[in-house]
Image (cartoon, rainbow, N blue to C red):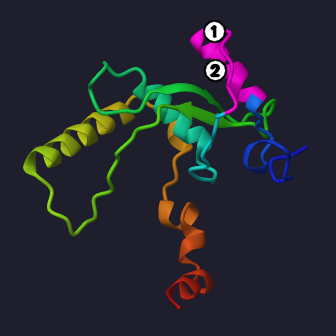
Amino acid sequence: MNLYTPAGGLFGTHVTWADVEEDMQNAFDTDAYFGPNKCATNIGEGNLHNLEITVYEHLRKLPAGKIPLAKVYYARKFTESNPVKGYIIMEYLDNIKAVHIFENVPLDSIKQILHATAVLEALSLKFTQDEKDCFSEKPFTEIFGEFFRKDVSCSRIS
């Protein structure tokens, strides 16, 4: 069993509803279980999963309300002993609107963004060197490089 072999779990992964249900029961100290209307949404793939969890672990230490943040109920990293079942269970935020670069944004909204950015910058000073080493120094080529390959960008344009 390895991460790159399709499996019978959620979205062809090795993560099953039983895995998620067990972790939710532990996180909420309950015997409740998922009913027949349960659903999951795949919101992305990539190699940044463990780093995302590390950032959420740091954000959790901030005082409540310091910056707007979805609640993370449970997160499981990929590790040597858990090479194929990493996931994050978090609050669903409804009515989120993407703001395009060409749209006007009220001054109060800009202030909120700048405040949150300052909080995140200050928080980054508390990362250990090992945690900092997980961040890419060249995100456009290392993380998003596949999008910028000539054959991929040409096929998206035509």
Task: Give percent across and percent down for residue 142.
Answer: 57, 62
Q: Is residue 27 above or below residue 49?
A: above
Spatial CA distance of label 1 from label 2 is: 8 Å
Q: How many numbered discs?
A: 2
Q: Nearer the viewer, residue 78 or 69?
A: 69
Give amino acid for label 2.
Met
Name the residue at 56% across, 50% down.
43
Tell me if I can see residue 81 in this picture: yes
Q: Label 1 belongs to which residue?
A: 30
The N terminus sits in image quarter: top right
Q: Quadrant of residue 53?
A: top right
Q: In the image, residue 85 lies at what x, y percent?
A: 75, 36
* Residue 65 on image: x %, y %: 27, 24
Disc 1 + disc 2, Cβ < 8 Å: yes
Q: Residue furthest right?
A: 1
Residue type at mark 1: give it.
Thr
Q: Quick one: 97 or 74, which is closer to the camera?
A: 97
Q: Which mark is residue 24?
A: 2
Which residue is at 73% across, 49% downward?
11
Q: Could you tell me which residue is drawn at 10 percent across and 52 percent down?
A: 106
- Apparent side of residue 112 relative to residue 96 in the rendered image (left or right): left
In the image, residue 95 above or below residue 29: below
Is residue 129 at all visible to an observer of this figure? no
Say what secondary structure mark 2 lies in: helix
Residue 89 magenta: no
Measuring from the top left, give residue 131's x and y in whole percent: 53, 36
Picture residue at 16% right of the left edge, 46% below the top: 109
Residue extending farthest left: 107
Read off the magenta span. Answer: 18-36
Q: Is residue 33 magenta?
A: yes
Quick one: label 1 or label 2, which is nearer the N terminus? 2
